[in-house]
Image (cartoon, rainbow, N blue to C red):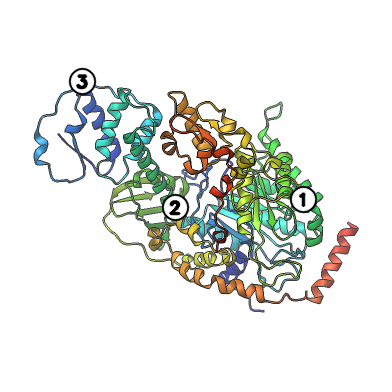
Amino acid sequence: MQIVLPRIGTVAAWRAEARRLAAAGVAPETVIWSVGGAAPDLFATAPPVAASSVTLTLPRAAVDGLETALMHAEPERFARAYALVLRLARRQVRWGDRSDPMMRRVLDQEKAVRRDIHKMHAFVRFREVTPPGANRRAFAAWFEPDHHIVEAAAPFFARRFGDMDWLIATPTLTARFECGEMQISETTESKPPPADATEHLWRVYFANIFNPARLMVQAMQSNMPRKYWKNLPEADLIPDLIRSAPARVMAMQEAEARAPDPRLQKRMRAIAAQRSKG
Amino acid sequence: MVSKSLSEKLAILADAAKYDASCASSGGERRNSRDGKGLGSTTGAGICHAWAPDGRCISLLKILLTNFCIYDCAYCINRASSGVERARFTVEEVVTLTLEFYRRNYIEGLFLSSGIIRSPDDTMAEMVRVARTLREREQFRGYIHLKTIPDAAPDLLAEAGKWADRLSINVELPTETWLSKLAPEKSVRTIHGAMAEVKARGEAAKDRTARGTRAPRFAPAGQSTQMIIGADPASDGEILHRSARLYGEYALRRVYYSAFSPIPDASKMLPLVRPPLVREHRLYQADWLMRNYGFAAPEIAAPGKNLDLEIDPKLAWALANRQHFPLDVNRAPREMLLRVPGIGPRSVERILKARRYRTLRYEDLAAIGCVIRHAEPFITLPGWSPRGLPDDANLRARFAPPPEQLSLF
């Protein structure tokens, strides 16, 4: 049996299908899952092997965890999740038991997806695209996540940027927020928006908040992997900041400390006198 | 004098702010702007939006209102006698930068600090004006951290707490002697006084009176502080003792440790050596043990003693207290499991949960997330017994790296 899930609302559709298949007693190995306009599988016409019907009642944590893991990019996730929910419902495995290889795989995928969502919240960079005369400011961003997380990650931006219009395009889906309404659609234009003037100020900030005496490139890269750099306006400054750091530190160590300005010393003495009086 | 552009001021006043370690945007109340009438949200967790090549996260726009300063603290790049280039933002400039950066998702909010211009009250009033403008006029609901000035008037502190999520007052140095030597205008008494004030107002804001009315909102994410490490001769034992006191007496959320790093145009009183980054790292680990693992300061480093730079403080404690080990993973209580090297709070929770269903075996530990190599000598469970290991006099050598790997450069 072949199940084709929609590109938008994939996880919710999977949940409905899994419930239906379990109730009909369909065995996991007889189901072929796919997303979007995949070509029909020629061998998928065979009638499902009937097994005993299963009603899916799962703990809240299991539902949340599975739904998150299902956003993973790996194609086998739907089949694995269906097999796992049947085992969970039959109490053959406990949610969270990492000694079970299937369970562990799902938990690892859940973790990878959560990290991807977190990185999207962190690394989306908006650029202003307000049309002349508009009464709401408008911003747009281009982001490339590893997994299918746009629908799960977008509500965060709606809560945060409530007073502006925004659009986040990814290679598959686009999230759009206009006048307080959020919409998810398939991406039509795969192009980052043009840079805006504030980006220059952000780059100035990034270069100057960096402390060359504490160079730790590994720590930076493990948290901000290179794959994100091409869509971060500040990232192309990094190689130069690293290269020039040792010379900057050397210059600080060699510079002679200056004597305080005499006018300043006088003023400081006056302040100190005033303070001791008060 | 030609007035500086916004970009020039930003370069100077960000550079001047980088010696403040904190960039946390966590804790406090949750807010959002889904109603469309404002900008911003706080989730309770905080997000790092970028990392600089120094490995530090960029979460807040961390700037000084001005780096003009009438104080002359020897360790500070902005001290009066420093030849560093000076600049001063207007209130409007800080407000605009914060909002424009925030709208582009660069930051979680603002961390504003300042040199002291004219007087502590004048400076504090201007910082409060930035926070008030953001909250009242701009309906900004992101994170605000104000570094308060200990000598400022109490009503300014009260107003700062009304608008900010977090307040901080730096203790600067671990001991009073060196504070008066290196920062002649600052006093421990004033700093502690201001901390006590922040604590009291914070507690009042959480309580209801008998009639059910609430005291005004006050810095829901609490207060934090920073100590400079390596500018004076204080030992790690003294530093941790001080931190424990600060956590206990003033209910601080965090104490930050900042390895003294060479600054441009430094004072001659200070060592211009590489910042002691490994030491700073070990202090953070020790601090973590005090806050999350139930360790007391003297257990980690006795007064006058320093932390072992080669191995982490938890391992050092286990090696020095071998009589407690090996520990039976299937029976040991939570507080003892927390003391096993290689087993953190999350692993402890997983062990306790799994134990309810079955007996844990050695093979389960990796899946649970324990660092086996560290834990092995200190535990016993089906499938593993350390045999002679915990008594092995050379156990330390198993963990300590060869000396040349120590440098972080």
In front: A120, or B398? B398
Q: Nearer the viewer, mark 2 or mark 1?
A: 1
Q: CA distance from mark 2 to mark 1?
A: 42 Å
Q: Quadrant of the N terminus of chain B?
A: bottom right
**Amino acid type, residue under disc 1 in the picture:** Ile
In percent of width and height, residue B179 lies at 78, 57
In front: A201, or A218? A218
**Residue at which label 3 appears:** A52
Dot 1 alpha-carbon crowd within 10 angstroms: few under 14, some 14 to 19, many 20 or more: some
**Amino acid type, residue under disc 3 in the picture:** Ser
Residue visible at 21% across and 31% down? A28
In front: B86, or B76? B76
Output the chain of dot 1: B
Residue visible at 48% across and 56% down? B103
**Residue at which label 2 appears:** A164
Q: Are marks 2 and 3 in contact (CB under 8 Å)?
A: no
In percent of width and height, residue A16 lies at 26, 31
In percent of width and height, residue B309 lies at 62, 53
Q: Earlier in the sequence, mark 2 or mark 3?
A: 3
Is residue B196 at all visible to an observer of this figure?
yes
**Residue at which label 1 appears:** B191
Is B378 situated above or below B63? Answer: above
Residue visible at 62% across and 37% down? B322
In percent of width and height, residue B125 lies at 71, 56
**Amino acid type, residue under disc 2 in the picture:** Met
Question: Going by the image, does B43 lie left or right of B158?
Answer: left
The picture quadrant where one finds residue A126 is: bottom left
Q: Are marks 1 and 3 in contact (CB under 8 Å)?
A: no
